[in-house]
Amino acid sequence: MSAPFRNAAGGLIDRARAVRFTVDGRPYEGFAGDTLASASLANGVRLMGRSFKYHRPRGVFGAGVEEPNALYGVGEGGRFEPNTRATDVFLYEGLTAISQNCWPNLPFDIGAVSQVAAPFIPAGFYYKTFFGGPRLWKVYEHLIRRAAGLGKPPQHRDVDRFNHRAAFCDVLVVGAGPAGLAAADAASAAGARVIMVEQDRLAGGGFLRDPAMAGGDDGLVWAMAVATRVKAEGGRVLSRSTATGFYDHGLLNVVQRHVEPGQITRDDGAAQTLWRVRARRVVLAQGSLERPLLFSGNDRPGVMLASAARSFVTRYAVRPGALAVVAGCDDHADLTARVLAASGIEVIAVMDSRVGGRVVAALGSRAVTGAIVSEAGRSRTVACDLIAVSGGQTPTVHLHMQAGGGLAWDAQAGAFAPTTARQNQVSVGAGAGRQGLEAALADGWRAGVEAAQDLGLSRPMGARPRGAAARPTPTVSGCCVTLTDGADAKTAFIDLQNDVTAADIDLAGRQGYRSVEHLKRFTTLGMASDQGKTSNLLGLARMAQASGVTVPQIGLTTFRPPYTPVTLGVLAGEAVGAEAAPRRRLTLQSAHAAAGAVWQPSGYWSRPRAYPMSGETSPQAAVREARTVRDAVGLTDVSTLGKFEVVGPDAVAFLEIICATSVAKLAVGRGRYTIMLREDGIVADDGTVWRLADQRYLLTSSTGGADTMAHRLSYARRVLTPRLQVMVTAVQECWVGIAVAGPNARALVDQATGAAPPRHMSVAAARLADQPVWLLAASYSGERAFEIYVRSYAAQVVWSDLERRVAAAGGRVYGLDAMDLLRIEKGHIVTGAEIDGRTCPYDLGLTKMLRKGGFIGWAGLQRRDFQRPNRPCLVGLDALDGVLPEGAMLLPRAGAAPQGHVSSAGRRVTGEGAIGLGLVASGPDRIGEVMIASSPTRRLQGRVRLTAPLFYDAEGARYVD
Amino acid sequence: MSIDPAPAQTVIAKLDPCGLIAVETWIAAPDVILTLAGSWRSTRVEPTVWWLRGPLDALDDTLARLTSALANDGAITDLSGGFDRLRISGPAWRSALMFGGVFDAEDPAFRPGSVAGTILHHMAVRYDVIDDHTVEIFVPPSYAADLLNHLRAAISRL
């Protein structure tokens, strides 16, 4: 297949490797090393897209990530990626691309009729046109979205894999152009751990477009040598990697592509990796972006940035046209003209604004066919198919700004350049506004040296590289951000991607928009996938001109991550599906599964909710299991409780600071219920404390509060009580906890251990199934019960032994739901329901347990609000109509304001009906009152009688042997 | 040290349970701990806390010996069963720990004998660098299966 616009020699493409691809089903051929854009141009394809709003024909405009026009949907099925810049996807065999925002096809797009209506749909027209209620807007939105827009989102599940990977370095260099390479070379030579990232697949930056000498060698050869040296020193060079965000504390996100968009990964590897790089120093060497020029029809296919034209010619050996007009405001125009001419393109005219040369208009429809140019006040029309434009250079300051850096206006360059840095960052080379190769190399080298020296690295390094451009280095001697005299502002596009014209900016000015942020929202300037890389400054300049102020007075919009679009898949990384978060497995998981457990997520844990028997629902199983505990004996897994050993001569002193209840008088072998408060007096968690030996205590907390309690204890130990001689250790998973509860529990434990079990709230060491265990006689169910703690590696044998004995005693295993029914009936509070981050001990009826000071939260408890008589306090709730929705509001009467809520509810274990616990204003003073429990969202409502929060064994007789 | 060594021969395994004892002293004396540890491997996990690990069948004797030797100068807690141990052996163990991690395991200063407590794929873990080619990872048993899967996947992605 012939490629009519490909030169016979030259370029950085592999002519030995032909690559086939399709665009809208039509087959083409390029070479390895081509981009979709360069290969398309080589094949004579000029039309590569339709504009966002007016569906104007568009061609490739840039040669890199700044491309606003040539956007395709690339790939198929689960690998489809919309809005892919043709300039930023390298060819691979079988690449398929489809054009966007056109129907029925790209050359003949019905949507192009909107160009006729363009005068009636200027910027912000829909703000003023589509009025009405929310329902009407849904209609409008549908129509607007169909008429305008970019690519369509993928319809299939992403089939690729993505990595998240951390990396740390002394010096991160963003950009492997001359300045970045010099910085990396210097820092690496000094002994720094260097990471250099480059969004292109090749290092070299400007050398890829404008050949030059560096370090005494060809620039690209030197670039490869530097990369090799950096890697040899233990550094990392990441190609096809874009630093997309710069966050606090030297954290940068770098997205690395292992394959091109839509390409099938090799060996089932990852398609992309999101590197989270923590860098001690960051060198930003991102270069600059060329600005377009403002003239009529400056969006026609065939109008492109001068730097892009040079790229296509030099790197890809592609002629983007046959007859060229080159326009610019500095020496880039001259350089471009010579490069184009050398490649066989006839340069018709060079329009240098410094001497009055301007392009007034591009002629043509689907492609440029000519231009009206103006020189010394005289206009003429020339035939051409390429207009290469250069309106000056804008330093790429996105990451610098994201890192909080400041900018200063450079009037000569007509651009903002970095000044102050808020983090350990420095901008170098063209990205810092430096001009010329030699300046970039010197700047980069100095930054590398200084970064290394800042880090105390002083290994001897060689001499800095010297540069010499093959052609005279362009100097920035002017900028051109104004509309050419005689050009039509309505077809002079400032933002190609959003179809924002100079006239739109003017309109915004006339309508009173003065803030650049408002201008952005009104016109959509700088939005969408290119984020205004080529348009922002032109827009600001136009607005400044219209407002009669300077560009710095207008200011800048905020630069936010990401610098270039990222796929959602790489943000998610491995954390999809079952890998979204780890699942904590019980040591006895297989035993529970064998018993038929239905699982309940509980934080990261999965715990048995119930063990339904054939034909049972989970709620039915829960009631059966709970009744088994009341009538005989039950067995359950309580391993997830927080557990802490507190050991040492000052163990008591420490616990008295942590616990709001008394610990000092606890005898060896005894335990008690306790609560822990936050500093503000609110109950943080509850649990038990056991004295295992003279100076050894076991403190338990709730499952959900275990991690928080670990942090609280660590803080108290390290910060509040550093001088105490106490060791505090989280032992949550050292021990598997197995609770045996019910009237038969004592006899069962007696039989299993061969020793008299401890009495209620006592602890004893024992052996069970030939394993050492702790027996904690504590009850959550209201029955005589034991928590048996066994080392995790020996738990299976103990569980099996107990399961067999429980079955022989007429019992069964029970789950979380049964546990909940039992504790509600007994009036036990639980973290997450009654301990809800708002309740203090007074609210929960725990006043009598409190010590008189000396513990965390005591000062907070003295707040007057805790003495307020109408605070919500704990009560029992007895459903009169059989309905008691958990979470329901408690109303004194229908239509009245709520005065409390149902914190827990369930069926009675003993007897019928529903009971619950609640928090009601002045609750204890309202016992006997009937309220309405109402849950409008579930459409449930019923009457409840307030009772004491205790429905079972008020005397505690069930605990006594 | 190559920053991205070949993943070949990098393997992960779950180790058998071992005796694990936390020791804290009020008199901060590392040499004392090393002496007390004897043949057990000691790792300093906090400024005043060491972990000693050794054979499970020697646990009771070691606990008794430590209790006696420390007397009132410190305390011990038996952590046996509280952590599973995973071992990554091979040249790419450092790279494997960077997947889903937040700790700089690639730092050359993180050398044999170094210990780090960190988060890996949401899980609290502790690394103990055994030698240049081996790291052991302590993780609560409830997380061990998922961590093992995560690390196997990480190694496969190198």
Image: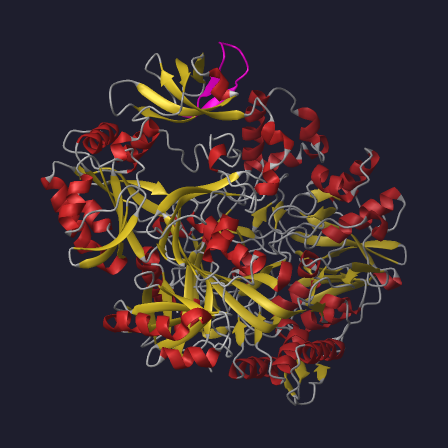
Q: Closest to the observer: B125 or A911?
A: A911
- As drawn, the residue found furthest toward the left would be A808
Q: Position of residue A590 (x, y in %)?
A: 21, 50
Q: Closest to the observer: A852 or A805?
A: A852
Q: Position of residue A254 (x, y in %)?
A: 55, 62
Q: Quadrant of residue A881?
A: top left
Above or below, B123 relative to A77: below
Magenta stretch encompasses residue A247: no
Quarter of the picture containing the C terminus of chain A is top left
Q: Position of residue A950 (x, y in %)?
A: 36, 25
Q: Quadrant of residue A399?
A: bottom right
Q: Is residue A954 visible?
A: yes
Above or below, B112 relative to A29: below
Q: Tell me: A802 left or right of A229.
A: left
Q: Quadrant of residue A425?
A: bottom right
First to last magenta residue range: A886-902
Magenta stretch encompasses residue A901: yes
Q: Tell me: B23 left or right of A630.
A: right
